[in-house]
Image (spheres, grey):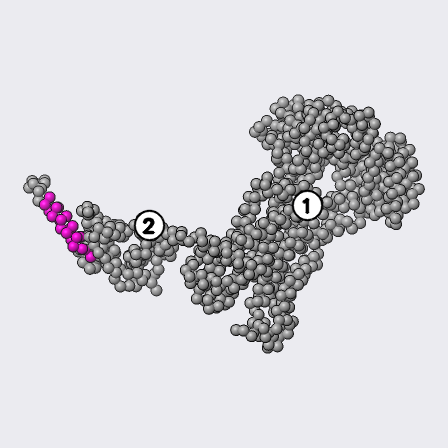
């Protein structure tokens, strides 16, 4: 099986899922991302990313209870899987490794 | 109250989105919507829609479903089976539906065939787009009024050819009437006499370069030489037995013809058959029988014949067709014709000319054409409207009966739903059922149409044919009707039936819910009766106007007067004197008068300009000129109000005038005109007025009275008017016939009673009245058929109610009243709507007639009453049956 890859936006969403642990669902992810990135993100982009990552096994989901705020619809909560965590770790290592290779020259 | 997300985007989302994602997606965007809504509702709505649209992407869209695939075909087979079983079970209901629809469709089909025939006139000519007719634009003295006529001056065709070289072909056409034809055998001895009322045309070979009338033998160019004649195959067979032997044979023609202001006698001329034309199609206004070379001098008189160089006179029988180059501008050419007419005509003649495309000729009711068969676009539209209405009435029956039947089908629908049918499948089932009914109705309608066609042909004097195989338009029409009626009639019932809640349906609780259906049904019944009553009222008014035509006193005697045309008297009165003496010796002949025509004519009059007294100019109006002997006044019982009758005379010596002429001249008393001189035909005749006649109707009721001159002139008499005693008319007519045949051995004897002739003026109105009668009858029949169905259904539905009412003491009359009450109210409502509609249209129709009836209130009352009585009769059958039923039977079983 080909090693699953991860896109930049997906990685951001995955990080947010991990960060919001157990409170991550569509709207909370979107709001936090918008706040951190200070740019507008459509909810549909989040849904697409979550669906793809669920297919790849980076996240898993469960339904919450019915609440009135959502027109009687359940929340779908996402948590990061072990595979997802490993993916984040390897990405982090890759980036810090590369970062460290930057020679100590002054950027004036 | 929480704000709700916009409805339509939400529906859309739910429609396309996969079920397993719906909770998440809808929940999330609703949550966002609600948060936003607190700040800005409008923006929140916009964003909601935008979010929904952003989710419309492959990941979230439901997979396409083809779940019907495996059993669709067998289900359709099942629909057909259950539908046909259902039809057989409810035989009377199916019969009403199919018969009603079939009659409606048959009427539609007939109208379609009629209109198809009428609109196909002269469309088979290959150059039809470039063929034009020349019309005269008459500018009357009172400059404001312009009228058009198909007659043109005699020098026109030749003039057009030299003045406008761009015209490709010019064909002068002279249509002759009432020609006597004598067939000669090879040795030149007479064999048989024939009379042709119409169909004898004088024209040149150019006519056949313009129009497509194929030739079986001989040549068109033979028409260049005078005294050649082309016969159609049918005429050749009638005259000579076999058309192949007809070429080269000789016919002797005696015409009585009318040009400009005069009636003329033609000397017998010999014609040589030089060609045979193929059968003339029915859909052309040129119903050719004999086509005579234009150069034939049948008048023996260059001054009044076809060679007449005079630009002043036109004859309605003399016209001209031209073949123009492609893409000419009609308006531009009319301008050129106007300039041309200024050039060639004397300055006081303001008439001008226009060209009219061939495609407009058959619809030009004003100027008419050679076949005297025109149909206005207005009438065609009315026919379409009637066809549509009758079809709608039939569809309404179907809708009413099917929705009324719905309760009976409720259990079936319930069971089907429980077993897993969805709405669209049930709708499909009921559409299939409608389709079955409509198809059988259309097949039945075709049969009805084929059977009815001969009577329609007779009524309208046309030759329509119903041939599905070589008329693809009919097939297309039938298919369209099938589909449209299925959709129209099947759609609504299928929606109603498939909407049932299966739980209620199986519990038989549906009767309550059908109240809404009843109000629609009421509306449709009202609609049907509006149409039916409007047609009944319209028919009553037309029939009343027809009776008025026939019974209104005309101002002269028209009863028991017979008119017999005869050969013009060239003996200066000897022949007429002999005839008169012979006729008066017959027992039963009261009076005999010879004249150019009868007191009332429809477009068959001689009109003339005239000069009154010492006036230098001619009067600014024309008068009808009739030539008649001194017996004319007593025979037709015309009334003199001043002066005396004409004195017996061969040549013209004196004039009688009518009151209208006196008034038009501006004279105060009738006596003022006596002994004043009037001259006509450019002073060729100048005589004193000796008497004034009380006004009588000298034209049809479409027109006002016209000023009239009557004078003696033996050479102008064309017919005898014989007043008969009312007893033994047939034996008197036998004697008259004998005298005629002895006096004119080579002349075909024919006669016409004056009242029949007057009736024939209104032939079109008569046909229209007949058509309306039929349509009104069908409309009321179809409406009542629907009513019968509804009433019988109601009787079944309310059988328990009726039973209980009877047990509690209701009489049969109470029950009948119960049933009738509702329908009567509906018909009254329809009456209130129909009355103004009918009044408006019939008022408009009556405006065409100068002499017309007033629309009385009782016509409407009668129309409404007829509808109510027929409807009551229809309902009462069912109502009485229900009222007389034994209540024990209906209440025994629960």
Q: Nearer the viewer, residue B707 or B162?
A: B162
Q: Are marks 1 and 2 on the same chain?
A: yes
Residue drawn at point x = 32 percent, y = 56 percent = B19
Residue B56: numbered disc: 2
Q: In which quadrant of the rendered image does the N terminus of chain B lie? A: bottom left
Instruction: List the residue tagged with mark 1.
Output: B454
**How many labels, in total?**
2
User: Picture coordinates of residue B382 (x, y %)?
Assistant: 62, 47
Figure check: A9 above or below B348: below
Residue B293 colored in magenta in the image = no
Residue B57 in the figure: left or right of residue B457: left
Quarter occupied by residue B366: top right
Residue drawn at point x = 58 percent, y = 55 percent = B98
Badge 2 crowding class, 10 Å Cα cut-off, few under 14, some 14 to 19, many 20 or more, is some
Q: Nearer the viewer, residue B340 or B444?
A: B444
For label 1, the SS is helix
Q: Magenta stretch?
A: A79-98
- Which chain does tag 2 point to? B
Residue B209: numbered disc: none
Spatial CA span between label 1 and label 2: 64 Å
């Amino acid at each position: 099986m080909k090693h699953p890859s991860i896109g930049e936006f997906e990685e951001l969403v995955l990080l947010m899922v991990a960060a919001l642990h157990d409170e991550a669902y569509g709207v909370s992810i979107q709001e936090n991302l918008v706040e951190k990135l200070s740019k507008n993100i459509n909810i549909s982009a989040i849904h697409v990313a979550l669906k793809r990552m669920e297919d790849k096994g980076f996240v898993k989901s469960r339904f919450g209870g019915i609440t009135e705020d959502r027109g009687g619809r359940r929340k779908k909560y996402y948590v990061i899987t072990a595979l997802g965590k490993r993916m984040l770790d390897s990405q982090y290592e890759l980036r810090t490794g590369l970062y460290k290779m930057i020679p100590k020259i002054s950027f004036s | 109250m929480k704000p709700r997300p916009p409805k339509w985007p939400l529906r859309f989302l739910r429609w396309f989105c996969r079920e397993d994602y719906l909770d998440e997606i809808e929940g999330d965007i609703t949550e966002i919507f609600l948060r936003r809504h607190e700040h800005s509702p409008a923006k929140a709505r916009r964003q909601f829609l935008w979010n929904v649209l952003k989710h419309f992407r492959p990941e979230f869209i439901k997979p396409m479903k083809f779940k019907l695939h495996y059993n669709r075909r067998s289900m359709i087979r099942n629909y057909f089976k259950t539908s046909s079983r259902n039809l057989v079970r409810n035989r009377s209901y199916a019969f009403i539906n199919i018969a009603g629809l079939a009659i409606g469709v048959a009427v539609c089909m007939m109208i379609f065939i009629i209109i198809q025939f009428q609109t196909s006139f002269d469309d088979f000519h290959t150059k039809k787009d470039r063929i034009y007719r020349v019309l005269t634009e008459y500018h009357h003295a009172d400059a404001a009024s312009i009228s058009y006529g198909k007659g043109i001056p005699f020098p026109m065709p030749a003039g057009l050819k030299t003045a406008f070289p761009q015209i490709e072909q010019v064909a002068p056409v002279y249509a002759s009437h009432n020609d006597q034809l004598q067939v000669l055998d090879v040795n030149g001895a007479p064999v048989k006499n024939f009379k042709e009322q119409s169909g004898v045309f004088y024209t040149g070979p150019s006519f056949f370069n313009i129009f497509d009338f194929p030739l079986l033998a001989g040549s068109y160019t033979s028409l260049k030489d005078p005294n050649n004649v082309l016969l159609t195959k049918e005429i050749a067979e009638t005259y000579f037995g076999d058309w192949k032997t007809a070429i080269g044979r000789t016919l002797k023609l005696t015409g009585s013809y009318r040009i400009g202001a005069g009636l003329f006698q033609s000397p017998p001329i010999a014609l040589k058959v030089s060609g045979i034309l193929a059968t003339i199609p029915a859909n052309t206004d040129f119903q050719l029988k004999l086509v005579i070379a234009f150069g034939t001098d049948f008048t023996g008189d260059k001054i009044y014949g076809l060679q007449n160089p005079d630009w002043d006179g036109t004859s309605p029988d003399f016209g001209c067709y031209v073949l123009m180059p492609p893409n000419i501008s009609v308006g531009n050419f009319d301008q050129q014709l106007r300039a041309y007419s200024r050039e060639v005509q004397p300055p006081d003649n303001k008439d001008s000319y226009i060209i009219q495309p061939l495609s407009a000729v058959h619809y030009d009711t004003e100027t008419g054409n050679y076949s005297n068969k025109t149909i206005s676009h207005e009438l065609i539209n009315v026919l379409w409207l009637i066809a549509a209405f009758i079809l709608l009435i039939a569809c309404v029956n179907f809708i009413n009966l099917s929705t009324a039947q719905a309760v009976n089908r409720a259990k079936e629908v319930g069971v089907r739903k429980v077993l897993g049918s969805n709405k669209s499948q049930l709708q499909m089932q009921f559409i299939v059922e409608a389709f079955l009914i409509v198809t059988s109705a259309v097949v039945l309608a075709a049969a009805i149409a084929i059977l009815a066609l001969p009577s329609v042909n007779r009524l309208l004097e046309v030759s329509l044919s119903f041939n599905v195989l070589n008329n693809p338009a009919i097939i297309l029409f039938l298919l369209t009707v099938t589909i449209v009626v299925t959709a129209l009639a099947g759609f609504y019932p299928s929606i109603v039936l498939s909407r049932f809640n299966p739980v209620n349906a199986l519990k038989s609780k549906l009767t309550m819910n059908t109240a809404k259906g009843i109000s629609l049904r009421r509306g449709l019944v009202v609609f049907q009766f509006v149409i039916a009553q409007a047609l009944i009222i319209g028919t009553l008014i037309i029939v009343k106007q027809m009776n008025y035509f026939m019974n209104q006193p005309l101002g002269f005697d028209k009863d028991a007067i017979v008119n017999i045309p005869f050969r013009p008297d060239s003996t200066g009165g000897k022949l007429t004197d002999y005839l008169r003496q012979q006729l008066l010796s017959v027992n039963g002949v009261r009076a005999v008068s010879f004249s150019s025509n009868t007191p009332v004519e429809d477009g068959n009059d001689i009109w003339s300009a005239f000069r009154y007294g010492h006036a230098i100019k001619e009067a600014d109006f024309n008068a009808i000129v009739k030539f008649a002997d001194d017996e004319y006044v007593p025979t037709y019982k015309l009334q003199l109000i001043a002066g005396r009758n004409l004195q017996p005379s061969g040549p013209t010596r004196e004039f009688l005038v009518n009151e209208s002429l006196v008034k038009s001249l501006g004279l105060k008393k009738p006596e003022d005109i006596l002994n004043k001189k009037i001259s006509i035909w450019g002073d060729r005749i100048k005589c004193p007025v000796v008497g004034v006649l009380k006004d009588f109707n000298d034209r049809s009721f479409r027109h006002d009275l016209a000023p009239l001159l009557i004078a003696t002139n033996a050479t102008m008499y064309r017919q005898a008017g014989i007043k008969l005693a009312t007893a033994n008319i047939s034996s008197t007519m036998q004697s008259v016939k004998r005298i005629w045949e002895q006096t004119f051995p080579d002349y075909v004897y024919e006669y016409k009673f004056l009242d029949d002739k007057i009736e024939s003026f209104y032939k079109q109105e008569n046909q229209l009245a007949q058509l309306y009668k039929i349509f009104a009858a069908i409309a009321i029949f179809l409406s009542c058929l629907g009513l019968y169905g509804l009433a019988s259904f109601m009787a079944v539905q309310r059988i328990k109610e009726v039973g209980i009412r009877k047990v509690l003491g209701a009489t049969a009359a109470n029950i009948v009243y119960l049933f009738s009450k509702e329908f009567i109210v509906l018909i009254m409502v329809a009456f209130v709507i129909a009355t103004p509609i009918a009044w408006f249209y019939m008022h408009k129709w009556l405006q065409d007639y100068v002499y017309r009836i007033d629309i009385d209130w009782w016509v409407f009352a009668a129309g409404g009453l007829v509808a109510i009585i027929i409807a009551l009769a229809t309902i009462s059958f069912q109502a009485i049956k229900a009222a007389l039923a034994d209540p024990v039977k209906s209440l025994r079983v629960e």
